[in-house]
Amino acid sequence: MTAVARVRGFIAGRFEQLRVGLSSPGALPAPWTLADWEVEQGVTFRFAGAAGAHLEVDLERSDPGRPCFVRTRDFNVYFSLFGRRASALSPSEEALLGAVVGAIRAQERAFPALRASLPVVGEPPRSRVEVREVEAERALVAEAPGMYYLNPYVGCIFGCTYCYGIGRTAFVRDLGGLPQASWGRWVDVRINAPALLAREVLTEPPGTVRMSPLVTDPYQPLERRYRVTRRCLEVLRESDFTPVVLTRSPTVVDDLALFRTMPRLLVGVSIPTDDDGVRAVFEPSAPPIAERLAALKALRQAGLRTFAVAHPMLPMNAAALVEAVAPWVEAVRLGPMAEKAHIAPTYARAGFPEALGDAWEQDVAGALRAGFAAHGVPVNPTTEPWNSFR
Ligand code: SF4
């Protein structure tokens, strides 16, 4: 049985009451309905409301050290909103979340508490990597109408210390009965993703497809052996879908010839700091900043629609980052570090303890916005298709 199928089997047993309960008439306040759920990046339920409104609820293993919307016995509960900019919850959304959290708590009482093992972070970069070839059940995961994500791999050899995928994938490994492995030292290769995708693009409504948001990098070194990302892009090239590729790896330029045949493609590079010393502390196994900038420049000079992402914004010289990045991008996305207190020791090791404060981040964001604006580069654009990379 494949890893994904095994996790699905566990979920079906463990969460059957919850899923069925959330789907039953009257379980949710009108007009909300349970639209979808998946277990690839933690446990996610997606709800559809009026006028295209969508709200996503994510469950991760209960961890008192990490802030969340609500903590139940077994879970940290998070939510995401799609399709509107306001972050405050409407009364309708509050009612939905209240119903969902109530259902989760009721379901928990019927089961023993979840086993909780912890992932390891920061193992030496040259230690052995556990590579598994797994069969996925689907390639495209719908986030909201017209927005999908696709993971060619799960797990990431770059092993960034702050990666948001650490907690989510550790939770799924627990659910699947797998032992915990150090983040950055295991990768699941979703070998059938291109074949699945070829079928799905014939049946799903076209939209943007993000590769890859949270739990992997599509151009990590294993891509040279497996080419799952390349083969997925070849499928998308023949479809009406718009790929949005984001990576930290200069390996992305291997596919320049393919990219040139994909006029809708957006391709971006994560450059969260100009300082490679900072990069080496926060992202010890990821490619140096100079290599990423060279890749970004090559992509732009090839005539592609490029963007850069500084999310999170690591300690940096904002003016230097703007000068290095602005000539090679059509747009930029900035975002804060989530849960900074969780990795406070890393900030101290990098020699920037002051960057833990929100004020530091706001100052840097302001300087970056002004700098990119002076170059005519939009920051965090909300118009299609730029709103689809995060
Ligand atoms: S490259 Fe991305 S997915 Fe990989 S460890 Fe770093 S942040 Fe996580």
Image: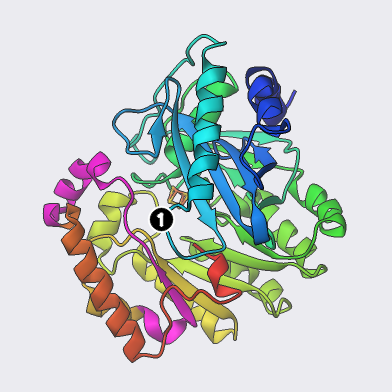
22 relative to 14, above or below: below
Residue 168 in sight in this render: yes
Identify the residue shown where x is 12% and y is 56%: 354
Three-letter code, disc 1 = Ala
**Percent position of residue 19, x then y:** 67, 28
106 relative to 293, above or below: above
**Percent position of residue 149, x then y:** 63, 54
Q: Is residue 281 left or right of residue 19?
A: left
Q: Is residue 170 left or right of residue 335?
A: right
Residue 129 in sight in this render: no
Mark 1, secondary structure of its residue:
loop
Identify the residue shown where x is 75% and y is 23%: 1
Any magenta on residue 309? Answer: no
| Quadrant in the rendering for residue 35 | top right
Identify the residue shown where x is 23% and y is 66%: 362
**Percent position of residue 135, x then y:** 74, 36
Q: Nearer the viewer, residue 298 or 32?
A: 32
**Percent position of residue 343, x then y:** 25, 42
Any magenta on residue 327? Answer: yes
| Quadrant in the rendering for residue 57 | top right
68 relative to 118, above or below: below
Query: Mark 1, residues whose alpha carbon is within 10 Å: few (<14), some, or many (≥20)?
Result: few
Q: Nearer the viewer, residue 135 or 313?
A: 313
Residue receiving disc 1 = 88
Residue stretch rendered in magenta on the structure: 325-354
Q: Nearer the viewer, residue 66 or 35?
A: 35
Q: Nearer the viewer, residue 175 or 102?
A: 102
Identify the residue shown where x is 40% and y is 54%: 286
Q: Is residue 288 left or right of residue 78?
A: left
